[in-house]
Every structure is written in C-alpha cells, then in structure tokens.
Image (cartoon, rainbow, N blue to C red):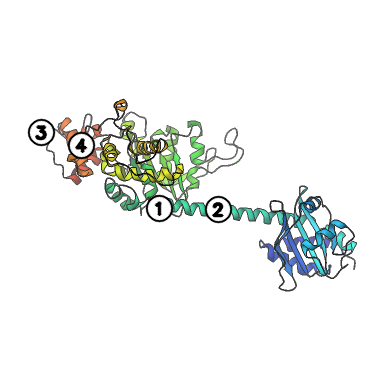
Amino acid sequence: MAVNKDEFFRAVTLRICSSLQIKTALDRVFEYLRDYFPIDLVFLDIADESLGANRHIAVATVDSSTPEEIIPLPENLWGWVENLHTPFILTGSDQDERIRAFAPHIKLEGYSDLAMPLRIEEKLIGFLILRSRGAGEFTPEHVDLLAVVAEPFAIVLANALAHEAEIKYRDILLDDNRFLRRELLSQMGDEIIGGNSGLRHVMEMVRQVAPLSNTVLLMGETGTGKEVIANAIHFASPRKDGPFIKVNCGAIPESLIDSELFGHEKGAFTGALTEKRGRFERATGGTIFLDEIGELPPQAQIRLLRVLQNREIERVGGDKAIPVDIRVIAATHRNLENMVSENQFREDLWFRLNVFPIIVPPLRQRKEDVPALARHFVELKSRELGVAIPPAIVPGALARLMNYSWPGNVRELENLVERELIQHQGGQLRFETVLSGDNNDKLKISADVDEGDISNLDEIISIHINKALKKTKGKIHGKGGAAELLGINPNTLRGRMRKLGIMYRQKKGKSA
C-alpha cells in the first residue's frame, strides 16, 4: 500500500517520544509499525564498543519471548558493523559472507531482520532492528520507509544512553554519600575521641544545640578539631540528610569570595558566561560551615550579615532576593572580639555569630585524650599507608606524648604519628623524636601544670582561670582583664567560673 512518508515520520516520532520509559515508547511504536512491516519483534540496541557487543536496552514483541540481552561480535565483524550507515536486510541464507558470519551471533536462523544503524553526528550509537519469522519477509520498500525515521530513533537512543549514564553516576554518588555519612557518623557523639573525657563539655553543648537551627560559633586554636565538631552538629541535627557545605574563608581569593559564596548572574563580570549558584544556595536544606570566618573581607561580612538576618542572598550582579533555608556554623582561631575593637570585623556580625559559642580546648588542656588519639591515628594512618598490622606503642612513649605541650594540637599529633609510621623499621612505636635533645626548642614540656597533679580537664581549666585572675588581680572585663588575657568573651568566662565554682571577690572599689 502507498504510504505518506511525512505522516509516517510524524506518527512514529510522536510515539517514540511519548514516554520517558523507553520500553513503553517502543511498545507503542511496535503496534504502529506492524501496520507497515511484517514484524514479530523490535529491538533497540546499543553498540557498546567497550564490550565489543550489541546490547538490547528495549524489546517489544508479540509474545513473552525475550532474546539474549548481549550479542558479542567478533573483532573482524565489529569494524564492518561500525561502518554501516543505511538500513539493511539480514537473512541466514544471505549471499554476503559477512552477513552469513554475522547470522549465528544474532540467532537469525528461521528469521529475517531489517536493521537500521542509528548515528549522532556520524558516530554509531546503536541499531533499530525489526525481526520477522521466516526468510525473505522484508523488501527494498521496507528499507526505504524505515530510513525515514532514523533521526528520531537516534535521538531517543542518545537520550536513553545519557539517562543510563546519569543513573549510573547518581548511584555512585549515593553510594559514596552513604559511605561518607557512615564514616562521619562513626566519629560523632560518644564516638568522638575525647567525647567522654577531655571534650565531654563540648559534646554536651553539641547535644544541646544540634536539634535546633540557630547559628553556632566554634572557637579554638588551629588544629583542635573544630571541623569534627561541626560535622557532629550537622549529622546529629534534623538537617543531616541535607547538604553539608564546607568553606574555608581564608583559602578563597578576596576577588572571588562574593561569587563563590553568593553566586553570580550571567554577565555580572568579565568571564561570567553563565549564572552560578553560590555555596549558600547549594547548602539550602542543610548546613554551611564557614571555617576561618575571621578572614572574611568587609564586603562579604555585610552580605553574610544579611543572610543571618533575613535568610536570603543576592547573587553578584543580581537584584533578586533568593531565600535560603540553611544553618550556619562558623569557626575561627582568631579573637573576633579584639578584631571588632580594631575595626577588622563588624560588631553587628559578631553579635549575630556569637549566639551560641563553643570553645574547643587545645590538646595541652586535655592531655588525657592523647593516648586514645595516638592509637586512633596509628590505626588510621596504617590503613592509609598500607601497613597491614598497626604497630603498638610502647608505654613510655605515651608518657612522653602526654608531657608534650602540642602547640599544633591534634593536627600536630596526627602528623607526628604519620611520620613515625613512615620511619618505622619494625617493633613498637617509640616516638623518640619527642623530647629528644635536638628538638628541645620545638618540643618542650608544658609548664602550665604538673601532669601528676591533674585528674581531669575541669581541674586544668580551673587552675588556668585562677592563674589569669591572680595575674589581673581579679579583673575580668575590659582592658587588661582576665577575659582579654584568656582570649574569650567576659560573659563566657563568668559562665565558666560559675560552672566550675570559682568564686573570686574583688577588692573594694574595683569592678570585674
């Protein structure tokens, strides 16, 4: 019968594009094609060069038969297949020796196939194959008619390939995300080393604040583990399934920080060829961790203040307020209060950030955690370095580690363990470089307290505060006060004193 090729093209295109499910769309096309072709099955195949095979991604049939999913091709046939451009007929009795060689691989005995190569920009991506029971069922007219719809089938197959790749990478990312979440969760709560000892007060505050959405400020020296505490807050919060975006404010050039944090519109500046979401937008529904917050330049401080006040951002070059549902955790090793007095940090931003400060103590103030941390890093670094059996630590070495003042805090201990493992020649780890004669200038015993007299962190902090109060003659607030000497907020110091039961009466006429 005469066929209007324009109408045929339109009808096939509508059907093959009618569903995101490729199998559903192919079933609809199959029913329509049966009016024009003597077919019993239709395959949509991928030419998978990595497998050296054709692979079915969708099959439509008149019955429940399911052909082999993967059809391996010999190397000598693969080159021939790659050079096919127009539809062709396959039968087991074909005179072409290559087709006869091809027939057993596709189990063509007793069938006829009409195969159409599908190409995108001249690259072969797969085939549409119509199959009929019996030999000689297809004619040159059938070949001409099928060639009309090569393009829509190629586009649909390309989209199916792209979707398949997207699903694959999504599954990889989800698996990685589950793995990383398990790794992070294993470090939280009581699992955080020191969570039941030197960091127990910090973890109490984490448990108080984690279920809420307020801003948290983590303060402490470099290397004390502020990022680990930020992880604990996020993954113990209702936002744990949302994104957790980390930003080191000191690592981003000042000229780029606005664009990185808040995004930019297309054409906002030279090189802004497309719009870009910033870190705050990417953190929507989750938490953003701003490490080294004291390094933010003034303009970024103004923008951050707006985020904390209104929970909305404005992209660079834009004039539209974009709402963001985020929690902000900030961290710093600097004294922000002093920076405010020196006009290096905005006072209003400091007040916004300082709603719930958590001070992460340095390692020298929680030396009872050193043995557990050392053992943890020995196991961790042994895995990273490929050491099959983590070596033990000699008891005397642990004593030396506990007597060291650790100016670089937990990070310095981690690096020391890694160096010791690299230099390890067998036996137990001795850490002989600690307190050795040629390192006395760098590795000195902490002179704050006699380690034998200290039973827990509260006592260490209490002694340290009393020393500061004695030095300032009881003055807590203001220039030369104990709070300034200790580098903390006066209200924080008074709260710590009340918690530790430190009573210090001022001389008459003096004000704390």
On the image, the x and y values in percent for residue 243 come to 47, 50
Of callouts 1 and 4, the N-terminal one: 1
Of callouts 4 and 3, the N-terminal one: 4
Of callouts 1 and 3, the N-terminal one: 1
Q: Is residue 27 left or right of residue 320?
A: right
Q: As displayed, is residue 146 above or below residue 453?
A: below
| Residue placed under numbered mark 4 in the picture | 464
Of callouts 2 and 1, the N-terminal one: 2
Residue 366 appears in the rendering: no
Amino acid, disc 1:
Leu
Q: As displayed, is residue 389 above or below residue 248?
A: below
Q: Residues within 10 Å of mark 1 (few under 14, many from 20)?
A: some
Mark number, residue 11:
none
Residue occupying image coordinates x 42% and y 32%: 298
| Residue placed under numbered mark 1 in the picture | 185
Q: In which quadrant will I find the N terminus?
A: bottom right
